[in-house]
Image: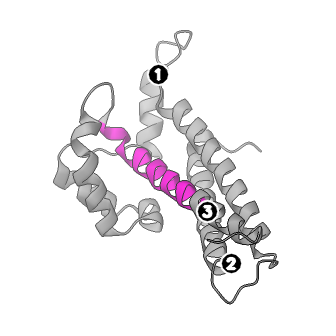
């Protein structure tokens, strides 16, 4: 049985989040002074980072399919159907003002698994105006927030991997 793409974006992004946090935890443990350079924790964390990055890339592809431009060959009622599905599956937000978005996102069960209320507040303050500008839709800020959080975890994991790789090779950190 095939899982709908609307649900896959949640599954893949939550899996990416958990695997990436495990990779970061592994690299930090490996970089402690008490851990030897030959400890297998480096390889374990490296594999977690690779797997988390793959889930992140798949999540981006899903987001582009769900929120990107509608293909020119799509049926006339496709846009209405897609927007209805996005609202039903809570992929987009309905708030228009900063306060409405803050209230909606801080009680969202999925967002709460990845970000604290303070992180949500800081993100909205930083990106609310830019999300409204240009071709971006304010309703897509929830997915954008999740993707940005995962991107920061990938970047942090890659930096920790570089440092851990130096330790593993016997180089000074």
Q: Residue furthest front?
A: 172
User: Which residue corresponds to the image point at 46% horizontal and 32% vertical from the top-left?
Assistant: 67
Nearer the observer: mark 1 or 2; the answer is 2
What colour scheme does the image use?
A: one colour
Residue carrying label 3? 20
Q: Secondary structure at mark 3?
A: helix
Magenta region, residue range: 138-157
User: Which residue corresponds to the image point at 57% horizontal and 53% vertical from the top-left?
Assistant: 13
Residue carrying label 1? 69
Q: Secondary structure at mark 2?
A: helix
Residue 167 in the image: state x and y as whole percent: 70, 72
Residue 89 or residue 168, whichever sits in front: 168
Q: Is residue 159 above or below residue 145?
A: below
Q: Earlier in the sequence, mark 3 or mark 1?
A: 3
Residue 28 in the image: state x and y as whole percent: 60, 76
Nearer the observer: mark 3 or 2; the answer is 2
Name the image quarter holding residue 2.
top right
Residue carrying label 2? 30
Residue 140 or residue 151, whichever sits in front: 151
Q: Are marks 3 and 2 in contact (CB under 8 Å)?
A: no
Q: Residue furthest top?
A: 73
């Amino acid at each position: 049985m095939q899982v709908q793409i609307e649900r896959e974006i949640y599954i893949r992004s939550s899996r990416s989040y958990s695997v990436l946090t495990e990779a970061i935890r592994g690299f930090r443990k490996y970089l402690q002074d008490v851990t030897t350079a030959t400890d297998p924790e480096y390889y374990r964390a490296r594999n977690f980072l690779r797997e988390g990055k793959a889930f992140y890339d798949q999540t981006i592809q899903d987001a582009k399919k769900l929120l990107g431009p509608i293909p020119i060959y799509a049926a006339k009622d496709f846009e209405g159907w897609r927007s209805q599905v996005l609202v039903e599956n809570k992929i987009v937000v309905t708030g228009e003002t900063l306060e409405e978005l803050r209230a909606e996102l801080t009680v969202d069960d999925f967002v709460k698994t990845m970000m604290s209320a303070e992180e949500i507040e800081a993100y909205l303050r930083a990106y609310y105006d830019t999300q409204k500008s240009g071709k971006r839709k304010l309703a897509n800020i929830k997915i954008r927030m999740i993707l940005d959080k995962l991107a920061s975890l990938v970047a942090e994991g890659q930096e920790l991997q570089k440092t851990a790789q130096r330790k593993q090779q016997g180089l000074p950190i």
